[in-house]
Amino acid sequence: MGQRPHRRDARPGAARGARPGPLPVEPVTPEPPRPHGRTLLTQSWHDLTFLHWSTDPAAVAPLLPAGCEPDTHEGVTHVGLIAFRMHRIGLLGLPGLPGIGSFPETNVRLYSRDALGRRGVVFRSLEATRSAAVLVARAGFGLPYTWADMAVAREGDRVHYRSERRLPGPRGAFSRITAAIGEPLTEPEPLEHFLTARWGLHTTLRGRTVFLPNSHPRWPLHRARLERCEENLITAAGLPAPTGEPVSVLYSPGVPVRFGPPRR
């Protein structure tokens, strides 16, 4: 009888039965690196101001979902405070939900990557004015939305954001932000791509870490000047208080966004 051919593992050096190691981290790309799949949610983000501070990866690693680690740029990771107007949330590609589909939002976020090499964000808190949207997002997607009294106002080249948390606590969490909009960026720097070109989020849903992919057109970005920032949302989210000025201040008029279903 002929000798049975020896079956080789497709991964060089892998032992039989060994679990595959982490895949290479995907590159930072200004357009989505993968299809988002069937559209689960549609929405638009308008009048966004991005504030970012650098921080030690070791300080944020315990705050990420299981299986995720801090995503870094030149050895540091970042905490973001992002204020904007959410517009026309819709389910399954349908028009925006009446009464709850548009509202101000301010979120605190971290930067993550997983064993499949996918880069994403992890939200530590998301303030919103619509209590129904808060309940749906917390129950359906495991996202830490909170109900807040908020306002966004545009005056010429300045945009003002205000937020005061209601429920759940800690009560007294707030932010006051004013940014002056500058010139458009024709070619963002690598850090600016790293902080904004994010094509999904990691969250914990029913005890498991999942990745919720999104897609949208390339960001239209402007430089911005921070004129006012009074807030305690970052420390309320369990993070060290930022020190000094942000390392990046950006503005965008916004983009339409589509989310696909959660993936393992």
Image (spheres, rainbow, N blue to C red):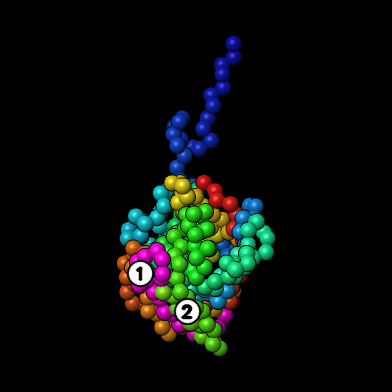
Q: Residue at x 53, y 24 (%)?
A: 6
Q: Amino acid at mark 1?
A: Arg
Q: Quadrant of the N terminus?
A: top right
Q: Is residue 181 magenta?
A: yes
Mark toward the start of the polypeptide (1 vs 2): 2
Q: Secondary structure at mark 2?
A: strand
Q: Is residue 127 magenta?
A: no
For the record, the magenta segment spans 165-191
Secondary structure under badge 1? loop
Identify residue for label 2: 161
The residue carrying pointer 1 sits among few (fewer than 14), some (14 to 19) or many (20 or more) residues within 10 Å by Cα, namely few
Residue 229, located in which quarter of the rendered image? bottom left
Is residue 133 positioned above or below 113 on the image? below
Among all residues in the image, which is located at the extreme top?
1
Q: Are marks 1 and 2 in contact (CB under 8 Å)?
A: no
Q: Position of residue 40 (x, y in %)?
A: 62, 55
Question: What mark, if any, has residue 44 been given in the picture?
Answer: none
Horizontal side of 261 relative to 147 (left or right) equals right
Please name the residue shown 56% across and 18% down the image. Answer: 4
Residue 237 drawn at (x, y percent): 37, 64
Between label 1 and label 2, give the one nearer the viewer.
1
Q: Residue at x 45, y 82 (%)?
A: 178
Q: Which residue lies under the disc numbered 1?
A: 171
Real-space Cα separation, disc 1 to disc 2, in angstroms: 18 Å
Q: Residue at x 52, y 53 (%)?
A: 140
